[in-house]
Image (cartoon, helix red, strand yellow):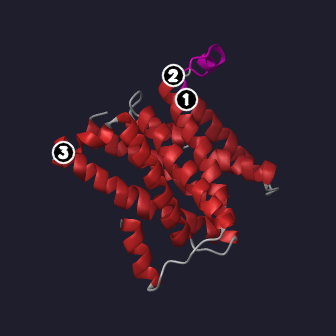
Amino acid sequence: SVCLAYCVYHAHSTIPKLNARQWLTAALLGATGIFAYNIFFLYGLQHISAGHGALVVAFNPVAVTIFSWLCLKETMSVKKALGVIIALGGCFFVISNGSPMKLLNGGIGYGEWLILGCVVCWTLYTFIGRIAHQQGLSSLIMTFYAVCIVCTMFAVLAVYQGIITDYPHYSIRVWASIIFLGVFGTALAFTWFIGAVSQVGPTHASAFLNLVPIWAILLGVVFLGE
C-alpha cells in the first residue's frame, strides 16, 4: 500500500504496464531481495542476536564487490582488494564467535548459515536491480511491481502455515513493528537502494551497507539489552 501511494504521488499518472521481460525482472527482484532475503533473515534472527546477524550481513558489500570483479569485469584496485580481505577476516571472526579455526571444523551455527543466505539473495537482488534499470524503468516502478508479486508470495505462505489467522491477537507493539518494516524497511529502503544502484553502481551503493551493523549493534544494546 505504501509503495503504491508513493509511486502514484511521484508519477502523477497511471502505473506503466510491463512487458514479459520486465515482469520476469520484477519477479526475480521480489523473489530474491524481498521474499527469500526476509525469510532467511527473520528465521536467522530466531537463532542469533540482532547485532550478530547484522555483522554477518555486512558481508554483502564484499560479495557484491567480488561478484562485480568476477562477472562484470569491474577493476579490482589494491585498496578494494585490501578492503575485501579485511572485511572477509571480520566476517569470519564474527561468524565463528571469535574463533576462526572453528570454520574448518564445521563450527558455523544454523542461524549464521541462514543469515549467509541473505548475502546470496542480496547480491542477486543488487545485480537484477541493475538489469531493471537498463530495461528503462525507474527504481520506484520496479519496486512497486516487485512488492506486489512478493505480497502474493507471502500471503500464500502465511495461509499455508496458518499464520494469517493469528492477526486478531497481535499486540500494538507487533502491529507497530509490522508497519515500520513495511513503510521504512521495505517500501522506502528497497526503492532508494535500487535508485542508488542505478546512479552510482552496485559496488559503491553496497559499500554503504557497512553502516548497517554499526547501527544494529547500538540499537540492539539500547532497545534489546544485547
Residue where numbered disc 1 is placed = 113
Q: Secondary structure at mark 2?
A: loop
Nearest to N terminus: mark 3 or mark 1: 1
User: What residue is shown at x 49% (from left), y 37% (from top)?
Assistant: 40
Q: Is residue 152 left or right of residue 183?
A: right
Amino acid type, label 1: Trp
Crowd class of label 2 (few under 14; some 14 to 19; many from 20; radius 10 Å)? some
Q: Nearer the viewer, residue 85 or 95?
A: 95
Crowd class of label 1 (few under 14; some 14 to 19; many from 20; radius 10 Å)? some
Q: Is residue 79 left or right of residue 225?
A: right
Where is 67 relative to 48, above or below?
Answer: below
Labels 1 & 2 near each other (Cβ < 8 A): yes
Tell me where the magenta segment starts and ends, as one range.
94-107
The picture places residue 81, in percent across and down from the top left corner, at 74, 46
Locate the N terminus and report the quarter of the image it occupies.
Answer: bottom left
Disc tally is: 3
The picture places residue 89, in percent across and down from the top left corner, at 63, 33
User: What residue is shown at x 79% (from left), y 56% (from top)?
Assistant: 72
Residue where numbered disc 3 is placed = 168
Amino acid type, label 2: Gly
User: What residue is shown at x 51% (from left), y 71% (from top)?
Assistant: 140
Q: Is residue 125 left or right of residue 218?
A: right
User: What residue is shown at x 44% (from left), y 81% (from top)?
Assistant: 10
103 inside magenta stretch = yes
Where is 136 relative to 188, above or below?
Answer: below
